[in-house]
Image (cartoon, rainbow, N blue to C red):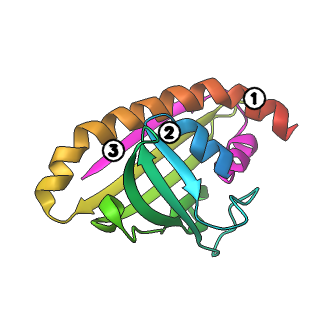
Amino acid sequence: MHVGLRIVLDAPVDAVRDALLSPSVMVAVTKPFLVYRSRSPEGFPERWTPGAPHPITASAFGLLPSGDTHVDLDLYEVHGIPVQRDNGGGTSGLFGRMTMQHRMATVDRGDGTTMLIDRLSYRMRPWVLGVALWPGMWVIWQWRALRMRALAPTWRTRAS
């Protein structure tokens, strides 16, 4: 199953790419539906480091535990388009029943804006759980779109 977005953000592509490497952006675009916390004693890093997995936990609305997972990024290009892929996987709770791949591609539109293609593909054990969770995943992804559109202009000023 999957959820995805194809949205235009009001920020240059470099600012969007930079923002996607920030744990604070991950937290800001899913809260309050999913509240992420670092499992590291040092807390979240300032930036995600490709190839350096970081343990996290999540809870629905900050109350219902969703389990533990980790962020483990790869950065690569497909036909010249930069892609950020999270290879992290669940280790406990609901996340432990999920196999997922999250990819985000950023495309320069040539006018100071960026096309973001954001896709989460996932499988659940048992599969019927994935079907039951899909409507909630869709709502969270719509919220992500709303939050990213609202935050993107601030990324423009931060990257300048």
Q: Secondary structure at mark 3?
A: strand
Badge 1 is on which residue? 154
Q: Name the residue beneath numbered marker 3.
A: 3
What percent of the width, then of the height, locates residue 61? 43, 37
Judged from this view, the residue extending furthest toward the right is: 160
Q: CA distance from mark 2 to mark 1?
A: 17 Å
**Residue 79, x across and y down, in percent:** 55, 60
The answer to whether residue 35 of the structure is visible from this angle is: yes
Q: Residues within 10 Å of mark 3 (few under 14, many from 20)?
A: some
Q: Residue at x 58, y 44 (%)?
A: 27
Q: Point out the tag, 1 or 3, that comes first from the N-terminus.
A: 3
For disc 2, the marked residue is 30
At label 1, the amino acid type is Thr
Q: Tell me where residue 148 appears, x and y as whole percent.
A: 58, 32
Q: Earlier in the sequence, mark 3 or mark 2?
A: 3
Residue interval drawn in magenta:
1-22
Distance Cα–Cα, label 1 vs label 3: 26 Å
Question: Is residue 12 or residue 90 the one in the foreground?
Answer: 90
- Residue at 57 percent of width and 59 percent of height: 84
Which image quadrant for residue 25? top right
The kind of secondary structure element at disc 2 is helix
**What's the residue at 88%, 37% (across, down)?**
160
The label number, if any, that marks residue 130 in the structure image: none
**Mark 3 residue type:** Val
Q: Residue 160 vs residue 34: left or right?
A: right
Disc 2 packing (10 Å; few <14; some 14–19; many ≥20):
many
Tell me which numbered mark, 2 or 1, is placed earlier along the sequence: 2
